[in-house]
Image: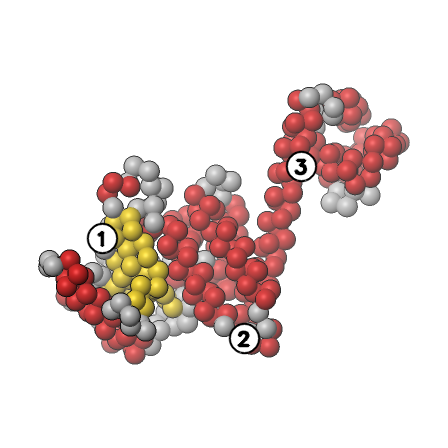
Amino acid sequence: MLRNRLDQFGKNILHDTLRHHGQAQTETEVPPGNAERIDLWFIPDSTRERAAWSFTGLLAAVARAPAFVELWSKVPEEKDFNGCLRKRYAWHHVLELRDKQTWSMPPIWGISAGRPDELLGRFGFEPAPEGPAGHYQTAAPGWQARMVVVSELPRVRDTILLRLLGHPPVWKQALKELKGLPEEAWERGVALPWLVRLKLDLEAADPTTLSPEDKEIAMDMQEWFKEFERDLKAKLMEEIARELLEDGRLKPLVHLFERRLARTLTASERATLVERLREQGAERVGDVVLDLSPEDLATWLAATNGH
């Protein structure tokens, strides 16, 4: 089911983020051999801090201490949270038996796509004093429970990966912000492989089993992937153009274009020139640079279809 795919997507995103700060395990059995599983169990490792990516906000708060993480792509009910408590207490017992030592009760970090009003009220969740909006904790510290409401998180960089776990409007905005990050941004390195995997899973899903929200997410993924492919192709063409310029094969043609335009070509325009050569051939490109006016030549370089 798509819900399972989305939940797994969220687990993979969190796992690949937290594993650089400690031991992160998904689908941990509670206790071993039991049908119940923890979505993600995390233990920080201070020896990895120097090599770890630098993140702040809620992700840093989760990574501060051993954490029991549960994700819900649908709004959880009281019975869902009670199930988490049951698993947490069972897992705490397993840890103490296994390690033959006393363990502090690990906090539950619940991550919900939408706001679980009834659950928050029943268990006395209040806004966490350290923020941000969308981060709640139980008033009684003995519960050791936190709740992250993805739909309420602020639109800032350190919540982008968490907001990828939200409903379509939140998801769509996070995708847009992810695309706008620098190419070397660590968030892109975490998210892109799993976004591609999710896109392939969505293509393989039976359309008759998808809800309207599921279909909206599938459409968002298709549009995102088209843009991703275009960006990837543009970067590849820029690299090819740079290499051709360095060995001299593209310099005469670039010089001719720059003479006609009375300016230097941008890296994007040089990449477009390489693509036009591949698609239309040197003879056609030669005719274009000689026949078109400087204004029309600039338009031809900027056009997506090259006509």
Q: How is the image coloured?
A: secondary structure
Give above or below for 247 relative to 205: above
Q: Is residue 179 above or below residue 139?
A: above
Q: Residue at x 55, y 63 (%)?
A: 201
Q: Earlier in the sequence, mark 2 or mark 1?
A: 1
- Residue receiving disc 2: 211
Q: Which residue is mark 3?
A: 237
Whether residue 86 is situated above or below residue 10 in the rendered picture: below
The reply, left or right, for residue 154 in relation to residue 125 is right
- Compared with residue 123, is residue 63 higher up or lower down, i.e. above or below? above
**How far apart are the alpha carbons under marks 2 and 1?**
37 Å
Mark 1 Cα within 10 Å, few/some/many (few <14, many 20+)?
some
Q: Which label number is shown at residue 65?
A: 1
Image quarter of the C terminus: top right
Location of residue 160 in the rendering, given as x and y in whole percent from the top left corner: 43, 52
Report helix, strand or loop for mark 3. Answer: helix
Whether pointer 1 and pointer 3 mark residues with C-beta atoms closer than 8 Å, the reply is no
Q: Say if residue 293 shows up in the picture.
A: no
